[in-house]
Amino acid sequence: MVWFGCVCLLHCLLDADHLKQQLLRVQLTTNPSETPSSLLQHLSTILISLGNRRPQTRAGLLMLLSTWLHNCPLAVTQFISVEENVQYLTTHIDGYGTEGSEDDNQVVRGLIAFLLTICLIFDESDEDKNRKNALSVVVERRVGKEKLVELLEGLSHSEHYVKAAQRPQPLAKTAQDLLLDYHFTKFFKSVEGLLGF
């Protein structure tokens, strides 16, 4: 399952900022005849290809990307330099998925808001000072800071978040019911106060 793979990798990245830049060098390909792409681009492509389906897979990818991009300006620069990534985040933040419950969709939308906020905070590109301003303008125009705050609060008050924050071992009736990880909820809580909103 994609979700478990994402959670395993995010556990490796928690409190290991030095590994985040090293992970940017990982190249892979799904077809030997294709040119390898970075792991970051591969994960982004999977996320975009899902559209608004498969909330569990999207939640896993969004948790991993948020953990990876946090405190890693180089990863943020590479991520937001792909216009499709920014477009996906700003257009799907308001969309309700075709699958999953209302609470599932609330979690995914909150994770999108979290990733967008991390991109805004850690975009420190020296090469193009206007790009950071451009990103904040795009986010303000398409989403708005109030909406980001609302979605972040919604995430931390969701049923999935409350359950995940209570016990380190995942607990669900079925594997498909897992959306958030305990250690991610602790990470989210530690970062939430620093978001500057």
Image (cartoon, grey):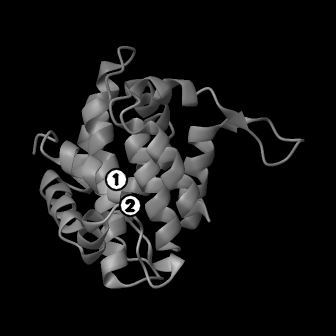
| Residue 54 visible in the shown view | yes
User: For this rendering, which residue is in front, 15 or 55?
Assistant: 15
Q: Are marks 1 and 2 in contact (CB under 8 Å)?
A: yes
Amino acid type, callout 1: Phe
Q: Residues within 10 Å of mark 2 (few under 14, many from 20)?
A: many
Secondary structure under tag 1 reads: helix
Residue 107: image location, x then y, percent = 32, 68
Residue positioned 65% across, 31% down in the render = 26
Amino acid type of the residue tagged 2 in the rendering: Asp
Q: Looking at the image, which is closer to me, 83 or 123?
A: 123
The residue identified by callout 1 is 184
The residue positioned 19% from the left and 68% from the top of the image is 154
What's the distance in space between the residues labelled 1 and 2, CA to CA? 5 Å
User: Which residue, given by chain and number where applicable, does mark 2 sit on?
Assistant: 181
Instruction: Answer yes or no: is residue 48 visible.
Output: no
Give the answer, above or below, for where 55 lies relative to 145.
below
Q: Position of residue 95 (x, y in %)?
A: 36, 72
Which label belongs to residue 68? none
- Quadrant in which residue 173 is drawn: bottom left
